[in-house]
Image (spheres, rainbow, N blue to C red):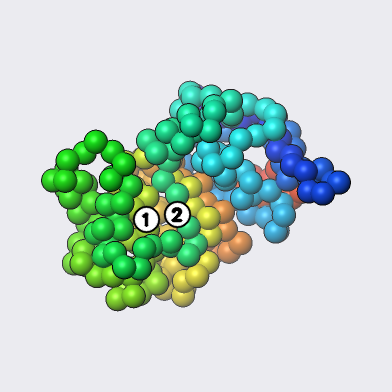
């Protein structure tokens, strides 16, 4: 059984008098623990697909199940709760709070849980240790390199131990050395920790780190290639 099962998924929205359909009748299976890269030109539908899988948006039609849960027909409130428990989101530009330390940024998602202060500290420190930043707990984003900032962002995404990680151009703002380091970290999270990772990228070198690459064009899945 696939971890992610998508059948005849479509997404449309109105833009003025026009109906825009970034995804149309797309079907896809993603095994648990796979590291999947989504590639395609701007407007191809890859970010739309990423947001649907992450429960950030809802499809117009079709079926979308994640770990046996039908998320295509959840209410906004139900999607918010589901995301908080099961999804970690990694952004290209990190979205760290500049006045907070690395530890405080990672701890942020846990403030909405019932965990005690000591439990939050254990989890945040463990996440930062996993990404190799146990010696940067008290550093603010301005005191970190771009690669280190992205590692903090990844630690924040995994601190609640989600099943699914979605990454939107996670290496797009990094130099080649930092990008390679981040891709290795994502690879390890998939291989060693069983995380299912969906990554949007324009960079073929980043896609090579994944198990499989899907190419989208005008909302259609063109081909599937192993990395």
Q: Secondary structure at mark 1?
A: helix
Q: Nearer the viewer, residue 25 or 20?
A: 20
160 in relation to 135, above or below:
above
Residue sitting nearer the eye, 26 or 47: 47
Give the quarter of the image for residue 85.
top left
Say whether marks 2 and 1 touch (CB < 8 Å): yes
Q: Which residue is mark 1?
A: 154
The residue beneath circle 2 is: 90
In percent of width and height, residue 37 lies at 55, 51
Q: Residue furthest right?
A: 17
Q: Residue at x 46, y 71 (%)?
A: 174
The answer to whether residue 171 shows anywhere in this view is: no
To which quarter of the image does residue 49 belong? Answer: top right
Between the residue at mark 2 and the residue at mark 1, the CA separation in whole angstroms equals 6 Å
**Residue at left offset 26%, top offset 65%:** 101
Q: Residues within 10 Å of mark 2 (few under 14, many from 20)?
A: many
Q: Residue at x 61, y 35 (%)?
A: 58
Image height check: is 98 above or below 70?
Answer: below
* Residue at 43%, 66% in the rendered image: 180
């Amino acid at each position: 059984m696939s971890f992610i099962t998508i059948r005849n998924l479509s997404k449309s929205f109105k833009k003025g008098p026009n109906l825009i359909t970034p995804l149309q009748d797309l079907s896809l299976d993603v095994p648990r623990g796979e590291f999947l890269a989504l590639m395609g030109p701007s407007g191809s539908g890859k970010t739309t697909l990423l947001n649907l899988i992450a429960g950030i948006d809802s499809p117009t039609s079709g079926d979308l199940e994640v770990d046996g849960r039908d998320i295509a027909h959840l209410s906004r409130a139900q999607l918010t709760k589901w995301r908080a428990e099961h999804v970690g989101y990694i952004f290209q530009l990190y979205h760290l709070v500049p006045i907070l330390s690395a530890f405080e940024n990672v701890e942020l998602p846990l403030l909405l849980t019932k965990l005690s202060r000591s439990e939050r500290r254990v989890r945040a420190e463990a996440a930062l240790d996993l990404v190799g930043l146990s010696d940067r707990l008290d550093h603010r984003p301005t005191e970190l390199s771009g690669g280190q900032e992205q590692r903090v962002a990844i630690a924040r995404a995994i601190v609640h131990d989600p099943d699914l990680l979605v990454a939107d151009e996670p290496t797009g703002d990094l130099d080649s050395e930092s990008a390679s380091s981040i891709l290795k970290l994502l690879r390890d999270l998939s291989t060693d920790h069983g995380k299912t990772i969906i990554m949007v990228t324009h960079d073929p070198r980043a896609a090579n780190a994944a198990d499989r690459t899907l190419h989208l064009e005008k909302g259609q899945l063109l081909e599937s290639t192993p990395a």
